[in-house]
Amino acid sequence: MGYAGRLRLGVNIDHVATVRNARGSAYPDPVRAARLAEEAGADGITAHLREDRRHISDADIENLMAALRLPLNLEMAATEEMQRIALRHRPHAVCIVPERREERTTEGGLDVAREENRLAHFIAPLAAAGCRVSIFVAADRRQIEAAHRIGAAVVELHTGAYCDAHAEGDVAARDAELARLTEMAAFAHDLGLEVHAGHGLTYDTVQPIAALPQVMELNIGHFLIGEAIFRGLGPAIAEMRRLMDAARA
């Protein structure tokens, strides 16, 4: 399987809904954010429908599916409820992530190796319905091998530890994480998996990840929504797109 096409950018719009929900109002509208993202150069939209509905709602998924021209990547936990929702809407992609009610954001990758049999049965009907199934994992050989065995089409490598080390100024840890991501992107690609990456990426950290030739898609959200406060959503996304393209060139 060779490398093909430009590096895709999936924009996660969860935190547009977070701002809306803070006041219980109808705005800002995640669908409007998705349209602005498309105009600014996004290749897809990502939304995480959490079990507690802390940001994206069921109505948001309905509205996004009806309004989007871009592909929707539905992030979700491996629960029966979420499987039913995904099978009803049949988004372009579903990304299976770990989820705990008390966490602020997704902490670490899914332990596919521990739940291999359950996850294999969980994703089979999603794949049969035409959804591209992605598994969010740490840059760990065991987890990538397990994702391949259960029939996932994609692994999304968790870049959080790399970004955290950079933010803390721990150069040794940052470089070690980048080396691990580099090695595991190549390993996953060699298994025949499509490789994506995401979590915590910023203007300062995106380029070394974007430069990895096996990575076909980055999913970025929280930083872009925060940066939009200062420069606007369209310009914030356009700058990320520029940095990604420069790294790939």
Image (cartoon, rainbow, N blue to C red):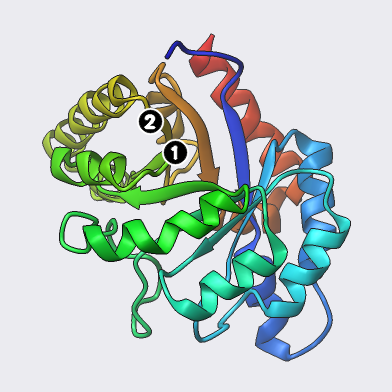
Q: Earlier in the sequence, mark 1 or mark 2?
A: 1
State the residue position of label 1: 153
* Residue 16 pos. (x, y %): 69, 67
Task: Estimate how packed mark 1 is, as few (under 14), some (14 to 19) or many (20 or more) residues with alpha carbons within 10 Å.
Answer: some
Which of the 4 quarters of the picture holds residue 23?
bottom right
Up/down of 172 relative to 92, above or below: above
Q: Residue at 28% across / 56% down in the picture?
A: 109
Identify the disc placed on residue 57: none
**Figure check: 13 above or below 244:** below
Q: Residue at x 37, y 65 (%)?
A: 106
Identify whether 70 is placed above or below 21. above
| Alpha carbon separation for disc pair 1 and 2 | 6 Å
Give the left or right position of residue 86, taking residue 164 as reference.
right
SS for callout 2: loop
Name the residue tied to disc 2.
193
Which image quarter: residue 101? bottom left
Which element type, helix, strand or loop, lies under badge 1?
loop
What amino acid is found at the position of numbered circle 2 in the picture? Leu
- Is 131 on the left or on the right of 71, as rendered? left
Is residue 86 visible in the rendered structure shown here?
yes
Q: Quadrant of the N terminus?
A: top left
Rendered image quadrant of residue 132: top right
Who's the residue at 53% across and 70% down the image?
A: 83
